Amino acid sequence: MAFSVCSFRAACRVSVVVAGVVLLGSCAGAAAATSPDFRPGARSLGDSLFPTIGNGGYDVGHYDLDLDYSVATKRLKATATIDAVATQDLSRFSFDLTRWNTVRRVSVNGQPATFTTDAKRSKVLITPSRGIRDGARVRSVVQYEGVQRPLPGKTILKEGWIPNAKAGAVAVNQPAGAMGWYPNNNVPSDKATYTTRITVPRGYSAIATGVLTDRRHDARNTRNPRSTFVWKSTDPTSTYLVSVAVGRFDVNSLNPARPKKTAPVAGSRNRPLPFYTAITSALPAKGKARSAATLGQSSGIVDFYSAYYGVRYPFTSLGGIVTLQSFGLNLETQGKPTYAVTTIDRDSGPWIGVVAHELAHQFFGNLVTPARWRDMWLSEGMSIFSEWVWSSTGTFFPIPTRDQYLDVYANPAYPISWRVPPADPARPEDLFDGDGMYRRAPATIEAIRQVLGDATFKAMMRRWLTEHAYGSATTEQFIALVKQTDPARAGRWTEFFRQWLYTSYPTAPLSPGAPRVDKPQINADNFDTYIDTAALRR
């Protein structure tokens, strides 16, 4: 669902939120909801791995989140103002939101709206007082509160708002955790801009997506002193890439736009950027210094990717968050990846490789986002490949990318499982399969590079990043691009992708006496000579 931020801003006036009341002028496009033209928006967008997520009938342009969080009680009180454009004549629509968030009030375009909740499917179902015409703006204000908890995850990650009564909280939104703490259209393809205001107990900091625009302390409340942090992002962001972290952090904020208050920093080779790091104060001084030094290499890493692919770093800030909480993996949250302290500051020393990986995601996954969760290999495979390229030129893990490919494809000492086809995962947990997504998928990209040649491959990837910038894309679109780049061998590419992306290989022969075929047979070395003998027999 592509969305034009510029056209949306031209159509909508800025809202004023005062004490939970939204002041908004009249809105064109409303009509009697009883008209036969109006119909409910879809309550799901039919994702093959997460069939209940997503909602139809509108396209979100901006989220304004006003969050008030109690660390001790884990209770979140919030108002979400959601600006969208209707994509059909709407009589009713829905947002994704989990059952432990109690909705208190909903308004649509300044008028009270009726609502119900579907706890089983994690939905808020909203009926506006009047129908909304296709193409009209829709401003929904949802007031809600609840004691936060993780989602019962279907993957290896803890998802949702991960609370800790002392440490604070961190939002883990991949793949579906965002609906755990704010109402949204929880699919990767519906990107939006964000304003996030977070009020927390004094002594805690709150970090979120974008640039810090305001920070203030309530000096009048001596019994329960609070601090508010305001973050704004003008970069379109998927719900799973939004960051929020509450904790006792050592925060380093370098913003060249405010030179009197902060020191300038080179964020990329193209332009200076605000650079934010937030490192948990629970680390000893040595650990903080190691973590800061590791995150301090971020600018150089994104410069490398920018030069390699010919595309400048795409977002308005850069940095990283190191949290005390452990949530399974690290996250490529937009602009400021979120790292578990156990990975960024290991006993063996800082792990710069994980930083290189999450920063590669800023191009693959964040700038160009998988349109559906079964397209996730486009994000993970391309990011691991990019990490391979980066590490091959340095001292961290200087192994050529071809050797990385051979280690996956032809190393008998370290065989991998070829069960999970990267572009056709059967289960949610397959999204994070170590062999399928983190070895087979990047080896697929490296094989493509070897077949096309380095210069042609880079030009193709630059085209991928520019044509789909700030949007989403599918596996089918990537395959089409490869074939457009190399049309003379389109048929061979069809067979290559069938084997490398879509085929699940068993660990044993299909039947007694049958030859064992446990991985793709067409590869980078036999691409032009491979003959499918099984097809000939058929």
Image (cartoon, helix red, strand yellow):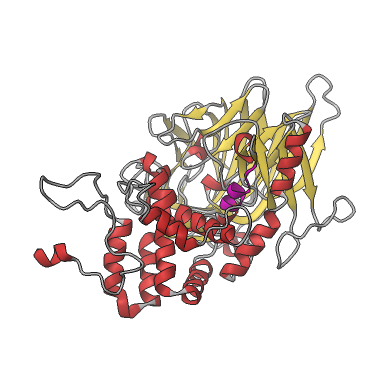
Residue 338 drawn at (x, y percent) = 61, 42
Residue 24 drawn at (x, y percent) = 64, 48
Asked if one can make out residue 381 in the rendered structure from this viewpoint, the answer is yes
Front-most of residues 458 and 534: 534
Residue 232 drawn at (x, y percent) = 69, 50
- Count of marks placed on residues: 0
Q: Quadrant of residue 481?
A: bottom left
Asked if 249 appears above or below 380 in the picture, the reply is: above
Magenta residues, start to end: 350-358
Residue 87 drawn at (x, y percent) = 44, 57
Q: Quadrant of the N terminus?
A: bottom left
Magenta region, main secondary structure: helix
Q: Is residue 200 left or right of residue 5?
A: right
Q: Quadrant of residue 537?
A: bottom left
- Taking the magenta stretch, the answer to whether it contains residue 244 is no
Q: Is residue 281 left or right of residue 354?
A: right
Residue at position x 76%, y 62% in the image: 272
Asked if one can make out residue 376 in the rendered structure from this viewpoint, the answer is no
